[in-house]
Amino acid sequence: MTTVLFVRHGRTTANSSGILAGWAPGVLLDDRGEEQAAALAARIAEVPLAAVVTSPLERCRQTSEAILAARLGTKLALDAGAQVDERVGECRYGDWTGRELKELAGESLWKTVQNHPSAVTFPGPGGEALRTTQARAVDAVREWNERITAEHGPDAMYLVCSHGDVIKALVADALGMHLDLFQRIQVDPCSLTVVSYGGQRPSVGRLNDTGGSVAGLLPPPDGRHASASDDAVVGGGAGAP
């Protein structure tokens, strides 16, 4: 099973100001966001990664750079760096971009975004449908899964640095949930969400993880995986060692 570590970027100046950033340029991590990115990078530094894929937006690139900086001298940091994929970029919010969330909450479209997001296309030039955001992100992950598996084997792990709504849409897909339910999922700044993609179905191992041990993501000392099967463990199993 190819395992993907989905990381939301750290807190930004827009997040702390209550602004919907979208694809607006120049939105950077604030001081807290830089601290979050450094802490996450240190926490997962020992997790073997075949690749780091990032949204092209500055806040994700900053977060990815912090993750790679914690791996200085490794082949991943030296040879590849973060690989940019626009398909895991933020939803294109059109005319909503750059506006205050408290103002947007008064728009008639807001209730549809909350309760029927699959019906939403954001207004104005370049506004995107949320279902399109989900489709392009899922396509990107599936293609990266195939590439990583071909180059590094079926048990490889890689990281995707993206955005809150994009990761929520990816988790909804992995859980077999309709997009209209994705607002029930929480993805905080610099949280870690882990999905393993097996032959039968995806499996969500972590969701919105903002602290604690990642020992369960490390390969076993003997190099063997516990099971070649991606069958669910009836009863829930014993968990990570």
Image (cartoon, rainbow, N blue to C red):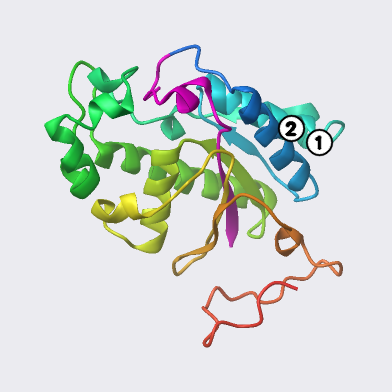
Q: Residue furthest top?
A: 26
Q: Residue at (71%, 46%) from the top-left corner?
A: 49
Name the residue type under label 2.
Leu
Image-based side of 186 in relation to 38, left or right: left
Residue 240 higher or lower than 113, as above or below: below
Identify the element where label 2 is drawn: helix
Identify the element where label 1 is drawn: loop
Q: Residue 183, position in %: x, y?
A: 32, 50
Query: Distance from label 2 to label 1 (Cα)?
Result: 5 Å
Residue 200 higher or lower than 164, as above or below: below
Report crowding for label 2: few under 14, some 14 to 19, many 20 or more residues within 10 A (C-alpha): many
Q: Nearer the viewer, residue 191 or 177?
A: 191
Q: Nearer the viewer, residue 210 or 89?
A: 210
Image-based side of 201 in relation to 5, left or right: left
Q: Residue at (40%, 20%) from the top-left corner?
A: 23
Which residue corresponds to mark 2? 68
Q: Residue 162, position in %: x, y?
A: 50, 36
